[in-house]
Each structure stands twice: as C-alpha cells, then as structure tokens.
Image: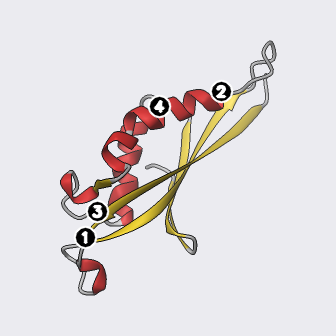
C-alpha cells in the first residue's frame, strides 16, 4: 500500500468586510490581507513519486475561491462574513474538486487563525 502524504499549499488575498452582527469596531467596513492554507491528503503514486500536484491544488483554489475573494467585498456574497463563515464557505466550494481535502486554515492577521477540518 502506498504511503499517505499531506500536501499543503498557501494562498494570499486581500478583501474587505464588515461584521453587521458584531458589537465592536469590526462592525464597520475594513480590510485584511488574508492567508489561506489548504491541506489535502493523497496516496503517493509510486510510479511518478507524486502524491498530489501542488499546481492542481493551486488551479482549483484560483478557480473556486479567488474570483469572489481577492480584492472583493466579502459581504457581497456572505451576509455575515466572519472568519468562521468565510472558512465554511470555502470548504463547501473546495471539498468536491479537492477530494482529499483535510483542513483549511485562514488567517485574518498573522496572530489570528481559524481552522476547519470538516464535519
């Protein structure tokens, strides 16, 4: 049986959002330079020596997420775009095209990270 590998690919994007249900300064429109880490599991192909092509993960994320996220207003498609709701939305968009999806990590700032591993 071929060994299982974990493939991790990072992405960066800038977006604005307001948190309409939050009682604090983030209720107002503001922006973040986000970092997203996509983590997938795949079996090593012993012939090619590759488990999952980094470029394939990159293509899927660029196609499924970035047009709506990068340099956009997240409130345009999410009513309450908290980090929690954003990462859930991302998971739903990626779980089918990235069959081995294991985990997403989303940073709004260097010191704050939301982690989701599916149901």
Residues packed near mark 3 inside 10 Å, few (<14), some (14 to 19) or many (20 plus)? many
Q: Nearer the viewer, mark 2 or mark 1?
A: 1
Q: Which residue matches tag 2?
A: 53
Outermost residue on the top side: it is: 47
Residue at the image position 36 percent from the left and 59 percent from the top = 15
The answer for how far apart the CA atoms under marks 2 and 4 are is: 11 Å
Under tag 3, what secondary structure?
loop
Q: Earlier in the sequence, mark 3 or mark 4?
A: 4
Secondary element at image label 4: helix
Q: Percent from the top left, x then y, of residue 57?
A: 56, 33
Question: For the residues marked 3 and 4, what is the alpha-carbon distance in whole angstroms?
Answer: 22 Å
Give SS at disc 2: loop
Residues at marks 3 and 4 touching, judged by CB atoms closer than 8 Å: no
Query: What residue does disc 3 label?
Result: 81
Which residue matches tag 1? 18
N-terminal label among 3 and 1: 1
Q: Which is nearer the eye, 70 or 85?
A: 70
Task: Pinpoint residue 115: horizontal percent, then vertical percent.
Answer: 51, 60
Residue 8, position as x, y percentages in the image: 65, 44
Q: Is residue 104 left or right of residue 9?
A: left
Q: Is residue 52 left or right of residue 32?
A: right
Question: In this image, 18 relative to 98: left or right?
Answer: left
């Amino acid at each position: 049986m071929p060994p299982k590998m974990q493939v991790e690919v990072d992405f960066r994007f800038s977006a604005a959002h307001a948190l309409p249900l939050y009682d604090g300064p983030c209720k107002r429109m503001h922006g973040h330079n986000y970092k997203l880490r996509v983590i997938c599991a795949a079996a090593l192909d012993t012939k090619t020596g590759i488990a999952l092509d980094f470029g394939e993960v990159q293509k899927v994320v660029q196609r499924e997420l970035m047009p709506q996220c990068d340099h956009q207003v997240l409130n345009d498609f999410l009513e309450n775009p908290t980090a929690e709701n954003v990462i859930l939305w991302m998971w739903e968009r990626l779980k089918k095209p990235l069959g081995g999806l294991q985990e997403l990590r989303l940073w709004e700032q260097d010191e704050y990270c939301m982690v989701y591993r599916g149901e």
